[in-house]
Image (tube, rainbow, N blue to C red):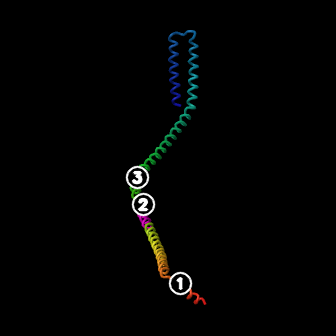
Amino acid sequence: MKRCAILALVLCATAAAGFSEGREGGEKEGGNLALWKWANFLVLAGGLGYVLGKNAGPFFAARSLSIRKDIIEADDTRKEAEARAAAVNRRLANLEAEIAALRAESHQEAHTETQRLRQHTSAEMAKIQARAEQEIAAAGKAARLELKRYSAGLAIELAEQKIRARMTPESQDALVRGFVRDLK
């Protein structure tokens, strides 16, 4: 409101100065017309001042409130961003410790896995060795049985050859007669 009043006074002063210049030069036929132009200008300026005074206050108040609201929201957003940045900085500060812990954990897991694999390998080797010993024993037993059969076959063949070599027609007849006698 004060601004509008000051504006109206400035306009009136400007109009009065223009009006006095018109009188000094002498009144011409258009002098009255100039007076009405200035009066019309003053009415228009006063109307504009009134409309601006009436509507400018609420407009600027709403605009000021909107700007304050935006400033508060921006401040809240800045605080949230600073909190997030602080959290990230804390995590970054702890990152070295976390990396060292992860390395120690992975080293321990690798050591445990190595031990497990060694035990598994030893167990598998023991199983393979036991199977191999069983197969060797079975192969040895089979070879001994085969050797006994072969030896028995050779012994029978040798005995047959000796018996044939000693067998004469008389001994054959004596054997057949003894067999027939045993049958009766």
3D distance between C-alphas at marks 2 and 3: 21 Å
In this rendering, is residue 13 above or below 82? above
At which x and y percent is residue 79?
Answer: 46, 46
Contact between marks 1 and 2 (CB within 8 A): the answer is no
Observer-side mark, 3 or 1, equals 1
**Was residue 141 drawn as part of the magenta stretch in this picture?**
no
**Was residue 117 drawn as part of the magenta stretch in this picture?**
yes
In this rendering, is residue 154 above or below 98? below
Amino acid marked by disc 3:
Leu
Q: Mark 2 or mark 3: name the one nearer the start of the chain.
A: 3
Observer-side mark, 2 or 3, equals 2
Residue that badge 2 annotates: 109
In the foreground, 32 or 163: 163
Q: Mark 3 or mark 1: name the one nearer the start of the chain.
A: 3
Residue that badge 1 annotates: 172
The segment highlighted magenta reads 115-123
Amino acid marked by disc 1:
Gln
Residue that badge 3 annotates: 95
Disc 3, SS: helix
